[in-house]
């Protein structure tokens, strides 16, 4: 390996972003359900959020000049790395209970690991993030492990 991950980057392991708190409304669920062409009444009526609802809900609202080429706000929660191209590497989700209108959710994302690997076209850096979403009362709602690949 070429030693692309320095001590400053490794010091990020275990670091968490400040928690993000959002309140879920029935209308938010209904709008998302219609926009994503859901067919189940529980989603269309806003009684329960469809599984991917959470990830749009947690995205920051950013001005156009702060969006990347893919239309998503650029993520500032990563250490300085010598490689710059960031790609999705996979996600594992565990749902502990549905998201419902009136829920006040608290989401915390932590950088869990950084590893360097050799790919077919050169070195790669794998960042592993853990997202934990709870109600404001501490009831676990969703856990996610997401990998981002930097090349």
Image: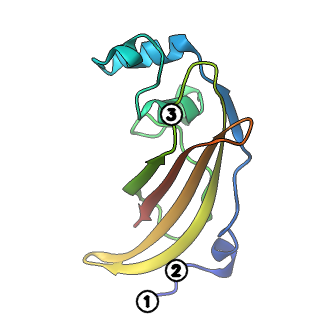
Disc with the residue nearer the chain's start (3 vs 2): 2
The residue positioned farthest toward the bottom in the image shown = 1
Please name the residue that numbered disc 2 is placed on: 4
- Circle nearer the N terminus (3, 1): 1
Front residue of 30 and 16: 30
Asked which quadrant contains residue 86, the reply is bottom left
Name the quarter where the C terminus is drawn.
bottom left
The relative height of residue 107 versus residue 1 in the rendered view (above or below) is above
Camera-side residue of 108 and 71: 108
In depth, the one of 145 and 124 nearer the eye is 145
Q: Does residue 114 appear to the left or right of 77 in the view shown? A: left
Q: Which residue is mark 3?
A: 54
Are the residues flagged by discs 1 and 2 in contact, CB closer than 8 Å? yes
> Which dot marks residue 1?
1
| Mark toward the viewer: 3 or 1 | 3
Seen in the image, is 9 located left or right of residue 146? right
Q: Residues within 10 Å of mark 1 (few under 14, many from 20)?
A: few
Image point 52% across, 86% down: which residue?
A: 3
Residue located 52% across and 71% down the image: 82
Looking at the picture, how far across and down is residue 105, in whole percent?
65, 33
Say above or below: 113 vs 89: below
The percent coordinates of residue 131 (x first, y second) are 57, 51
The quarter of the displayed image where residue 107 is located: top right
Circle 2 Cα neighbour tier, 10 Å, few/some/many (<14 / 14–19 / ≥20):
some
């Amino acid at each position: 390996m070429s030693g692309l991950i320095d001590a400053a980057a490794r010091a990020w392991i275990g670091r968490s972003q400040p928690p993000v708190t959002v309140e879920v409304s029935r209308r938010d669920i209904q709008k998302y359900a219609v926009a994503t062409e859901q067919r189940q009444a529980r989603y269309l009526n806003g009684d329960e959020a469809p599984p991917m609802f959470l990830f749009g809900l947690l995205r920051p609202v950013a001005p156009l000049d702060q969006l990347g080429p893919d239309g998503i706000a650029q993520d500032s929660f990563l250490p300085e790395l010598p490689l710059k191209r960031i790609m999705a590497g996979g996600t594992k989700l565990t749902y502990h209970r549905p998201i419902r209108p009136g829920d006040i959710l608290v989401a915390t994302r932590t950088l869990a690991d950084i590893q360097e690997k050799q790919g077919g076209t050169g070195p790669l850096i794998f960042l592993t993030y853990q997202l934990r979403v709870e109600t404001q009362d501490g009831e676990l709602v969703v856990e996610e492990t997401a990998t981002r690949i930097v090349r």
